[in-house]
Amino acid sequence: MTDLFCVADILKEKDNIEILTHHYPDGDTLGSAYALCLMLQSLGKHARVITSGTVARKYDFLKKGVEMQSFEREFVVSVDVAAASLLGENQAEYEDIIDLCIDHHGTNSISAKNSYVDANAAAASEIIYELSKAMDIELTQDMASCIYTGISTDTGCFRYSNTTPCTMLIASELMAVTPNWHQINTEMFEVKTREKLNLERMVYDTLEYSCEGKCALIYTTLEMQEKAGIGDDEMEGLASIPRQIEGVLLGITMREKADGTFKISVRSNKDVSASDFCARFGGGGHKAAAGCTVEGDLETVKNLLLSAAREML
């Protein structure tokens, strides 16, 4: 485990840096990646962000100020990527050549030459904020907007249990630098397209309870997605629906993919561990939020998940 000042020294020495996000990137992995890219470019270095899967349009503003640079890769950094499988379409090319891993998942299994994993950080973007201090970089408005987005989205706008006093102090400093923080919250948590609302209406009809109401499961199929007229870039956020139900300790969201698998997102309450649940299927994450991928048809996968839920609960 490398300490944060070592990470700062390593990055100061390197150039021609590629920054990897996880598959179907969310606000934290994108916020971390683009903030780090801006930081490195501010030092005169060549850097670019490599994503995997469709990126939601609402995150386009994170690219503001980032220079499009052409160079031959010399150094690879992954941010907010807990396992090689989460690199998605980039896994084959990058999993064995990651030079530096920066993450906040205690279950991190990335094989990198150097790693900095802080499981106490509410978001990977929180680590990037601390890294900016270690590198003596004064945050610009664009950098602060990226970091704020990452922290805000991974804490559910500071509502989740991973939010700490340190998280709030960092957020307050970021708010002083980026006056559009309230617009970021609105875009991330309130604005929805009509297509997204149509899909959510169908999702509620799939809701199924188990374990005397302690487990709630919902799903989306490719057919539902097509009927709603919605793309992969607008699927984020559905996983919070089951956990919001009174009495639910384990909320499971199944999302059918074109490759014959289901992307599983699990959210939990109280002492139930979403990470332990997903570990049964080769996944992982945090205690309150985790994910995995399970191959099979709808009924087969659903029965597997509900059986595991009954064992756990």
Image (tube, grey):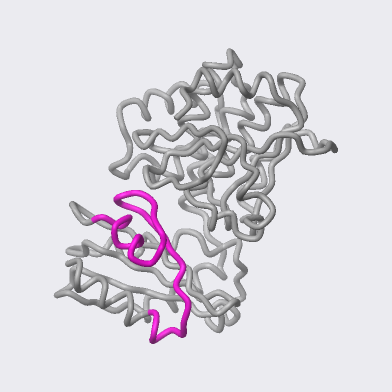
In the displayed structure, does residue 206 sit left or right of residue 189?
Answer: left
Q: Quadrant location of the N terminus?
A: top left
Residue furthest right as drawn: 70
Location of residue 9 (image quadrant): top right
Task: Name the residue: 48% across, 22% down.
Answer: 4
Q: With respect to residue 234, does 51 lie above or below?
A: above
Residue at point 62% right, 36% down? 99
Of residues 17 and 34, which is closer to you in this image?
17
The percent coordinates of residue 295 (x first, y second) are 48, 77
| Residue sticking out furthest to the left | 212
The spot of residue 251 in percent (x, y) is 30, 65
Look at the image and give the residue range highlighted in magenta.
273-301
Q: Quadrant of residue 114?
A: top right
As for residue 297 lying within the magenta part, the answer is yes
Image mark count: 0
Left/right placement of residue 99 relative to residue 116 reads right
Q: On screen, 27 above or below 41?
A: below
Q: Quadrant of residue 52?
A: bottom right
* 7, above or below 303, in the image: above
Residue located 68% across and 19% down the image: 13
Task: Look at the picture and state if 235 lies above or below 35.
Answer: below
> Which one is in front, 23 or 1?
1
Left-right relation of 237 to 51: left
* Residue 274 horizontal/vertical position (percent): 30, 57
Q: Where is residue 11 in the image (x, y as percent from the top left)?
A: 64, 24
